[in-house]
């Protein structure tokens, strides 16, 4: 058996699908990572225990050919190994879906429309005590290269808007990795103390951040 991949796999999907279609996208992504098998996906809310909403989960039972030697009898067919847990996360923004699949542990991914965050931004809702978007979030922000920005084409205001959207996306990604989502206030997350954060290339007008297992 190969070792688990070190970096979660991330995929973007076009369109604005409903929940059933999102589950299909998640299944396809797990199959792309782990190969043929049976993928089961669902939701579990850590607060109320509902399976109608909450954190997505997935399992994968690998195909195993049966029969034709190896002591498996003379018949042929497909059996499946015992299902293994696969950690998954997803986000929807701007008509896109982004999914993340991890074999190492809990993962979170979030995407945001820059202008939506700009219109809804509030320091009191997003920032922990002592945090600011202009540089005091720690080394992760200080060394940031925005993977989806247009570089010199951005004005100062546009860069500020992107920085706020990136901050928002990073905090939501962390909360998804924790498994609580926005049931935990974003002000309870200090980005400078969170390992495994990575900017993702994103469609125009969006930012996206991955919170990898740690």
Image (cartoon, grey):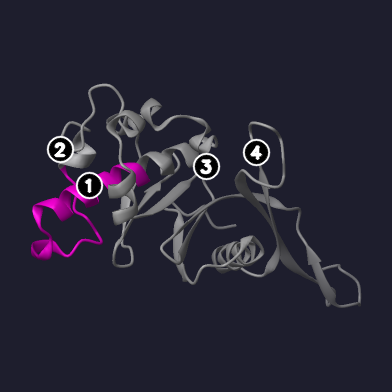
Which mark sits nearer the N-terminus, 4 or 1? 4
| Residue of label 1 | 163
Which mark sits nearer the N-terminus, 4 or 2? 4
Q: Position of residue 197 (x, y in %)?
A: 34, 44
Q: Dot 1, how many residues are within 10 Å of its Cα: few (below 14), some (14-19), or many (20+)?
A: many
| Residue of label 3 | 106
Q: Secondary structure at mark 2?
A: loop
For the residues labelled 1 and 2, the Cα–Cα distance comes to: 8 Å
Q: Secondary structure at mark 1?
A: helix
Which mark is on residue 78? none
The quadrant of the image that shows the C terminus is: top left
- Residue 95: name its quadrant: bottom left
Check contact, mark 1 vs mark 2: CB within 8 A. Answer: yes
Q: Secondary structure at mark 4?
A: loop
Q: Nearer the viewer, residue 67 or 39?
A: 39
- Magenta span contains residue 188: no
Which mark sits nearer the N-terminus, 3 or 1? 3
Q: Is residue 101 left or right of residue 195?
A: right
- The residue at 54%/50% (across/down) is 103
For the residues labelled 3 and 4, the Cα–Cα distance comes to: 15 Å
| Residue of label 4 | 45
- The residue at 17%/47% (across/down) is 160
For the residues labelled 3 and 1, the Cα–Cα distance comes to: 25 Å
| Residue of label 2 | 134
Which mark sits nearer the N-terminus, 1 or 2? 2
Q: Dot 3, how many residues are within 10 Å of its Cα: few (below 14), some (14-19), or many (20+)?
A: many
All told, the count of numbered labels is: 4
Nearest to the eye among marks 3 and 1: give it. Answer: 1
Q: Position of residue 136 (x, y in %)?
A: 17, 31
Q: Dot 4, how many residues are within 10 Å of its Cα: few (below 14), some (14-19), or many (20+)?
A: some
Q: Position of residue 33 (x, y in %)?
A: 54, 64
């Amino acid at each position: 058996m190969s070792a688990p991949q070190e970096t979660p796999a991330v995929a973007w999907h076009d369109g604005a699908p409903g929940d059933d279609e999102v589950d299909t996208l998640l299944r396809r992504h797990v199959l792309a990572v782990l190969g043929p098998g049976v993928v089961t996906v669902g939701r579990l809310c850590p607060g109320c225990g509902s399976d109608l909403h909450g954190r997505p989960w997935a399992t994968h039972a690998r195909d195993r050919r049966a029969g034709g030697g190896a002591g498996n009898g003379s018949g042929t067919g497909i059996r499946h190994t015992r299902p293994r847990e696969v950690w998954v996360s997803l986000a929807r923004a701007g008509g896109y879906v982004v999914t993340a699949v991890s074999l190492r542990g809990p993962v979170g991914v979030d995407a945001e429309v820059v202008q939506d965050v700009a219109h809804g931004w509030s320091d009191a809702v997003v920032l922990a005590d002592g945090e600011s978007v202009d540089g005091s979030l720690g080394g992760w922000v200080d060394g940031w290269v925005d993977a989806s920005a247009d570089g010199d084409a951005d004005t100062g205001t546009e860069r500020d808007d992107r920085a706020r959207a990136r901050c928002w996306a990073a905090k939501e990604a962390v909360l998804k990795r924790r498994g609580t989502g926005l049931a935990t206030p974003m002000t309870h997350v200090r980005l400078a103390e969170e390992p495994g954060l990575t900017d993702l290339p994103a469609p125009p007008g969006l930012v996206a951040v991955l919170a990898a297992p740690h």
